[in-house]
Amino acid sequence: MVTLFLCMLMAVDYSAMLPVEGFPPGDGPVQLVILEFTAATEIALARGSELISGYAGFPGILNSAKASATYDPATGVLSVYSQYPFTGNYYTAEYSVGGDYELRLMSGDYHDYYDEALQQMCLLHRNNDHDGVLEKAWSVFYPGSNPLGREMCVVLLVSGVSGVRTRINAGVPPEDAMEWLEDVYDAGFNLSGELLHQVALTGYPEGLSITRDEYLAALGELDTILDSVDCPDKAAEVREAIETLENQ
């Protein structure tokens, strides 16, 4: 019993502590204490140096440098978010907070941030929100470590070509529409380090809701657009990419 008490004190003194948003301010701010001296991460609530709850397990990796905690007084639920080191992937856990502040784990979920971002880009494209696709591409965390960068670039190209055509059909001057497409290309290079029309040349990514035929059709339309705005060199590059893909 004495050993357990000392370990609890050590956790308050030396473990990472995060502010918890949402608790009524009357009795002072509440912090989330992270016990990192054990193989399994545990958390508790504290005010200042005083623990006000017992410990409860956190099933994922709790990276205190990129974590947050929020309490909802309406539901009595504590939500803890932790983004993993060197990636956008993250873990979320929810705890019920009893009247005596005791914590009970309700749920814990690992999230593949990059797959979620890819699916959001696909949905935005299907809804013809091409600006939304571009915005999402620019917002991706750690693009250089993105395992789905090529897949995102396929979506970005197909959506970008549709966005350019929509702008031109709406009366936007072609040069202005092409400036927007340059931003699309810049976002793609940020994601993959390759030109958008070249990302699938080593093989079309599997598992995409956008088919290979849709991608080839978008490349063909891009070729036509580039010819119409007098960019023969770029159009030739796109045609070369089309031929390479068709011969795979």
Image: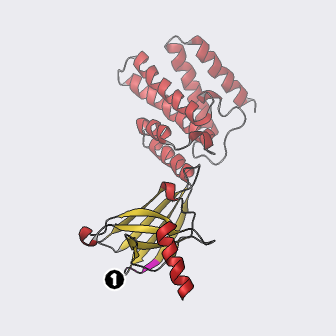
Magenta span includes 103: yes
Quadrant placement of the N terminus: bottom right
Quadrant placement of the C terminus: top right
Q: Nearer the viewer, residue 82 or 195?
A: 82
Q: Residue furthest bottom?
A: 1
Q: Nearer the viewer, residue 88 or 149?
A: 88
Magenta span includes 204: no
| Residue at (59, 29) in percent of width and height | 196
| Residue at (45, 74) in percent of width and height | 44
Q: Position of residue 234 (x, y in %)?
A: 59, 16
- Main secondary structure along the magenta-highlighted residues: loop
Q: Position of residue 141 (x, y in %)?
A: 52, 44
| Residue at (49, 13) in percent of width and height | 229
Q: Is residue 206 left or right of residue 85?
A: right
Q: Is residue 211 visible?
A: no
**Around disc 1, counting alpha carbons within 10 Å, would you say few (fewer than 14), some (14 to 19), or many (20 or more)?**
few
Compared with 185, 59 (above or below) is below
Q: Position of residue 117 (x, y in %)?
A: 51, 48
| Residue at (33, 68) in percent of width and height | 72
Q: Which image quadrant is residue 246 in?
A: top right
Q: Nearer the viewer, residue 26 or 227?
A: 26
Magenta part of the protein: which range? 100-104
Question: Which residue lies under the disc numbered 1?
Answer: 99
Q: Residue furthest left?
A: 26
